[in-house]
Amino acid sequence: MNVEDVRQRLNGIQHTLEPSRLARREELGAELNFEEVIDPATRIVDLFRMVPLGAVDHLSSNQMARMGQRLVEIRDIVGEIDGFSATDANAVGRRDSLIQRMKAAYDDCLVDFGPIIPFLVLKISEPQNLEARVSEKLQELEERFTERFAGKSKESDELMQLLTKHSEEAEKKVDAISVAAGKVGVATQATFFEKARSHHEGKSTVWQGRTWRRFVGLLVVSVILLGSSTIPFFYELDMTTAESIQLALGKALLFGTVSYGLYLAAKNYLAHKHNEIVNMHRRNALQTFETLAEAAGTPQNRDVVLTYAAACIFGPQPTGYTRRDGDSASPPSSIIEIVKGMAATDNG
């Protein structure tokens, strides 16, 4: 299946498939209707509506084939639901089978295309792609205009001037959209760090509670072990040396196990807290970069701002929660140079 076939079938799923009509309540009644199909069918439509039609050609051949296969499969299931009759042989079993197939189709589509949808959305949202699409439409309109008004010089000149004026205005808007899209792209990258920060914040809170509980447990165990010599249940006056050694080893093992549990809980808490703060710094660096870069003015000052932003994003940040905070190593200069080169290319 080629790109156009996939795009055509995808467009059909996005705009013509109405999950609510698949229920067929009035025709099939309360026992044989397809109410259970509405939810998975709606999820399928919502999933495929997130796939930009213009980004289909960015799929690999295997992904293209799988998407075409899934779209045909969904079309066939919808066709069988539309053609289902209550008088069919084993109507109940066939109905249940169609419902299960629709649910399985959503699961398969989510597994196959869920991971690649963010890539397709970002790809089609890149400023250069946006500008190319608008320019392509303008060129197409100009060609159609030329063909339509060929030979009508006066009307053609007047309309051509009008078209040129609107084209210039459209190009200015494209430039403004490109700048805005670039800023949105930076903000989009900042959201990734915000999600990571939020994730580690939740985990650090959980492990902080576990650390406190283990700490209290260790205190209780320590008090019991220290006072066990006065409790007959734990200690007998006529114990032999071997029994005393065995009891001491048991106490040491218990204390060591509880202590190790406290150590692991504290280590996980410190790790998540460190990552929370690091991702917060990265988010702030991306959110403030555009403002600082614009205020910097000259390219040299922008390079300074970019260097510090790249160092904050790619370099380890001291937070006070890890042993290696004192190192505060800078990222390799090659990474900063690559980032500078990308920024210079975008500006150019």
Image: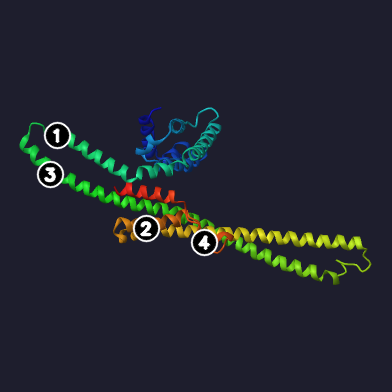
160 sits left or right of 33 in the view: left
- Of mark 3 and mark 2, the one earlier in the sequence is 3
Q: Is residue 13 positioned above or below 248 on the image?
A: above
Could you tell me which secondary element the residue under label 1 belongs to? Answer: helix
Between residues 161 and 5, which one lies in front from this camera angle? Answer: 161
Q: Quadrant of the N terminus?
A: top left
Q: Where is residue 103 in the image (x, y as percent from the top left)?
A: 51, 39
Residue identified by numbered label 2: 304
Disc nearest the viewer among 1 and 4: 4
- Of mark 2 and mark 1, the one earlier in the sequence is 1
The circle drawn on residue 318 is 4
Q: Is residue 252 visible?
A: yes
Q: Do the residues labelled 4 and 3 touch (CB within 8 Å)?
A: no
Gap between marks 2 and 1 measured at Cα: 50 Å
Q: Is residue 15 visible?
A: no
Gap between marks 4 and 3 measured at Cα: 60 Å
Gap between marks 1 and 4 measured at Cα: 64 Å
Q: Is residue 63 positioned above or below 207 on the image?
A: above
Residue located 78% across and 59% down the image: 253
The circle drawn on residue 162 is 3
Q: Position of residue 216 (x, y in %)?
A: 69, 67
The quarter of the displayed image where residue 262 is located: bottom right
96 sits left or right of 129 in the view: right
Look at label 4 and name its amino acid: Pro
Residue identified by numbered label 1: 146
Look at label 1 and name its amino acid: Thr
230 sits left or right of 347 in the view: right
Between residues 75 and 185, which one lies in front from this camera angle? Answer: 185
